[in-house]
Amino acid sequence: MHKIAVIAGDGIGPEVVREGLKVLAAVSEIDGFDYEAVEYDFGGERYLKTGGVLPDAALEELRSLDAIYLGAVGHPDVAPGILEQGLLLRLRFELEQYINLRPVKLYPGVDCPLKDKGPEDIDFVVVRENNEGLYTGSGGFTYKGTPNEVAVQEMVNTRFGVERCVRYAYDYCRRRGDKKMLTLCAKTNVLTYAHDLWWRTFQEVGGEYPDITRDYAHVDATCMWMVKNPEWFDTIVTCNMFGDIITDLGAMIQGGLGIAAGANINPEGVSMFEPIGGSAPK
């Protein structure tokens, strides 16, 4: 029996989750597995009523389940950052979901905004580091609210965090299919400290995978080639911020945000699965 946490969330989240659960029920009958959906009311409405986002006890309970199905996070009456940091990022960080996995796949019958591109051209995966980078919240303000204000947000990269992401990407690329090409998306010419670490790790770990072709593209070039020649890509590995950006571009070339899905993976623990579109408040 699989126990799955269901967090419908805000806005269109409950509608999307409701349809997803219909699919899960059908698949369980076809494949012959049993599951129990455990529902939680975390989101904007709960925060407005209680002032709380994610109780510590609930977080510990989620650790014991098999998976989390999340609808969407974001409420127009809640200040930006409260739900995103208190629920979404807290789950990703404290449950060590250090891989954000985003398939970019155009399905037959889905319209693509790219001229002359079809399902055979758009089929790649982005492996995004999910626990470090600019999303750690390291930094702060000095003289906030004054003409001399300084805001600092630090990009935090560790060898441990980068290597486990890169190694996951090589393993995933090896399993994916015949192309077996892993592209590092970074900005080594400008981020000469953080992305030098990514480059060296990518090359050193790559020596253990002689069957995988190594490729590199600056993030701006990656965006260009995703539009012009998406068929070039197989698997892309990248940092937290760049992964956040290029996967939204990927969603559009595969037919729109409503088509795209994402997974927050802890290979040794509980993972969380979600549509990548937000709550879409009116």
Image (cartoon, helix red, strand yellow):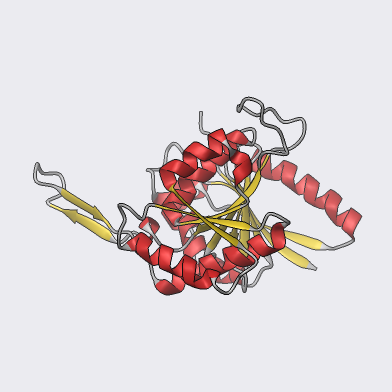
Residue 171: horizontal and vertical position, in percent? 63, 67
Which residue is drawn at the image coordinates 37% and 52% (left, top)? 187
In the picture, measured across the screen, residue 220 lies left or right of residue 212, that is: left
- Which residue is at a point 43% across and 46% down the rendered structure image? 219
Question: Is residue 259 left or right of 57 when viewed as pictured?
Answer: right
Residue 174 drawn at (x, y percent): 67, 64
Whether residue 95 appears in this view of the structure is no
Residue 220 in view of the camera: yes
For residue 67, which quarter of the picture? bottom right
Instruction: Tally the numbered discs.
Output: 0
Q: Position of residue 249 (x, y in %)?
A: 52, 38
Q: Residue at x 80, y 68 (%)?
A: 1
Image location (x, y in percent) of residue 12: 60, 37
| Image point (85%, 49%), residue name | 26
In the foreground, 65 or 212: 212
Q: Is residue 139 above or below residue 163?
A: above
**Which of 120 and 130 lies nearest the eye of the viewer?**
120
